[in-house]
Structures are given as structure tokens and as C-alpha cells.
Image (tube, rainbow, N blue to C red):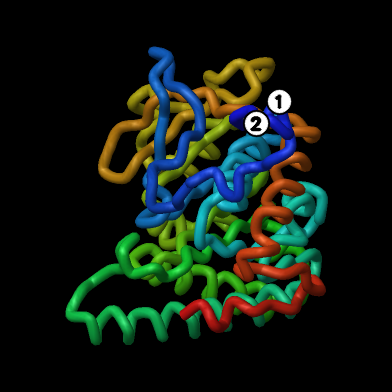
Amino acid sequence: MPATARDPLGTSRVPVAPGLSMFDPMFIGIDEFGEHVMLDVVYRNLLIAGEPGGGKSGLINLAASTAALADNTRMVLLDAKFVELGPYRDIADAFIGNDIEAAISVLKRLLTVATNRYQWILSQRRRKVSRDDNLSVILTIIDELAMFSTVLGTKAQQEEFEGLLRGLVSLGRACGMPVVAATQRTSWDIIPASLRDLFGYRCAFRCTTHGSSDVILGQGWADLGYSATDIDPDNRGAAWLLAEGGIPRRIKAAYLTDEQIYNIADYAAWMRRPSGITVPAPSTTSQWEMAA
């Protein structure tokens, strides 16, 4: 910060906000030519998958950190193992752990918000929200999708969760409610084609089989030479990224250390408190119903 007579080193003041917006492209890393890779997350959904240790969690945290620092952005987090998205729990409007009933409830409420937003969009004679509407972006991040779709709860609850998620992924992109979902288990029962194809962005970290890579990117890409099996297991963060309507390209996701993640989360909590966007709340208590 600029130095003053009282503060010659310029260290006493902290910027109120970094000026980020989820309507701006989100930086996630570099491609094989060293060029920045940016994703238009607000109008797309992002699917992340790959074997443990491949770097999947790094991309999840890039999305969460960007949303945490972005202006007028709310977060809904589902993390069955708690620790991946846990640093952001105090700034999330809802943080769900290994409770599938709570997960189902929060998805139902998100769909209600999405429906309300589309009614408003229709009244404005438009087809999607824009930055100038001043509606908050509501980003839903789900880590380890398989826990909610195949492990927790009963078969009926798992099917209900999957159906609600499919609805949110279908509806969210045009009303400012994108979804980022990640899983270590890359199989058709976890990511059926009917769900996968709703994600405009798909990122495949290292996989052990061509079939697993195709589960993420789409059928046939491995036969054309775009297979996550060829990623060096020691090259964490390397992945194939498929953008909507494009061809997969090699990328290297940026990496945040645990210390950096918690520093960002702490700063975001400080930044948001005076703004009234979010106040710390119990894990299943939220105020974002009013965001519509």
C-alpha cells in the first residue's frame, strides 16, 4: 500500500477486495506451450476426475479460492471427507459433510432458487443472466461425487441425489449457478454419459485405463490419442482438458499449498464479513435462498 507520514512503510492498510468476478475467465494453469488456460465458469459446468494423487484436488481448490475471493459470489460446498473444502466452510452459505439427507435438501433448495431466477430472466425478456444484473453467482462444488451417488445413504437416496444434481447441472449455467464436481472413481455408474455430457468443461487427470479416460472426456477420444493413461504418474497436475465443442488439450493445473489455501480462506472470511454477503453459520444453515 502507498506510504504515508503516519505509515512510512505503507503496511497498515489492507485492500477491501481484490476486484475478481466470476464473470471473468478463471485462471486454472498453463497448456503445453506455456500459455495461460482460462475457463468461463459462470456459463459452463466443470467435471474433474482422475486417480488419487493426480492433482484433482489442486483444481478443486483453484475454483474454490477464486470463488472465495470473487465479488458477489456465494458458495455451496459438499465434501464427504470434510478436509478438501473445509478451509472455506466459514464463508460458504452451506457446507455439507457426509450427510446425504442434507445434500439432497440443499440441492432441492438450489433448484428452487434456479427456478425463481429463470422466472425473473423471463420477465426481463432475456435468456440468461449477465454481470450487470447484479445477481450473486452461486457456485456449487462437490468433492468426491461417488460418496453421494454410491456410498452414503440408501439406493433411493443416491438416485434422488443424482437426479437433483442432473437438474442443477442442466439449469444452473444460464442463471449464474454453475457446478464443479470431482471424483476419483471414473466409471459409468459414477459418471453416466447423460450427466457427463451436461458439463461443458471436462478435465481428466491420470487414469489407469483408456475406458476410464473416455468416461471423463467422452467416448472415442482415447482411440484418437487423447488418453489420460499417458500422463506420467509423477507429473501431478497434468491433465487433458476438453472445452465445450473443442478438442482435448494438455494442461498443467496451478497448485496451491495448504498454507496458501488457508491464507486465502482466512482473507476471504475477513473480506466478506463487513460486506454482508455471508456470515459464518452452522454447516447446514444458509441464507442464500434470498439470493434469487
Disc 2 to disc 1: CB gap under 8 Å: yes
- The amino acid type of the residue labelled 2 equals Thr
Q: Residues within 10 Å of mark 1 (few under 14, many from 20)?
A: few
Is residue 206 visible in the rendered image? The answer is no
In the drawing, does residue 266 fall left or right of residue 209?
A: right
> Residue 291 appears at what percent x and percent y?
51, 77
Tag 2's secondary structure? loop
Q: Say which quarter of the image contains residue 107.
A: bottom right
Residue positioned 74% across, 79% down in the render: 285
Residue positioned 38% across, 22% down in the render: 225
Whether residue 155 is situated above or below residue 194 in the rendered picture: below
> Residue 146 appears at what percent x and percent y?
67, 57
Residue positioned 42% across, 50% down in the render: 41
Q: Which residue is mark 1?
A: 8
In the drawing, does residue 140 fall left or right of residue 22?
A: right
Q: Which corner quadrant holds the N terminus?
A: top right
Tag 1's secondary structure? loop
Q: Residue furthest top?
A: 33
Residue positioned 45% across, 50% down in the render: 21
In the drawing, does residue 190 fall left or right of residue 103?
A: left
Q: Residue furthest left?
A: 125
- Comparing 289 with 49, the one in front is 289
> Residue 244 appears at what percent x and percent y?
31, 45
Q: Say which quarter of the image contains residue 45.
A: bottom left
Q: Which residue is mark 2?
A: 4
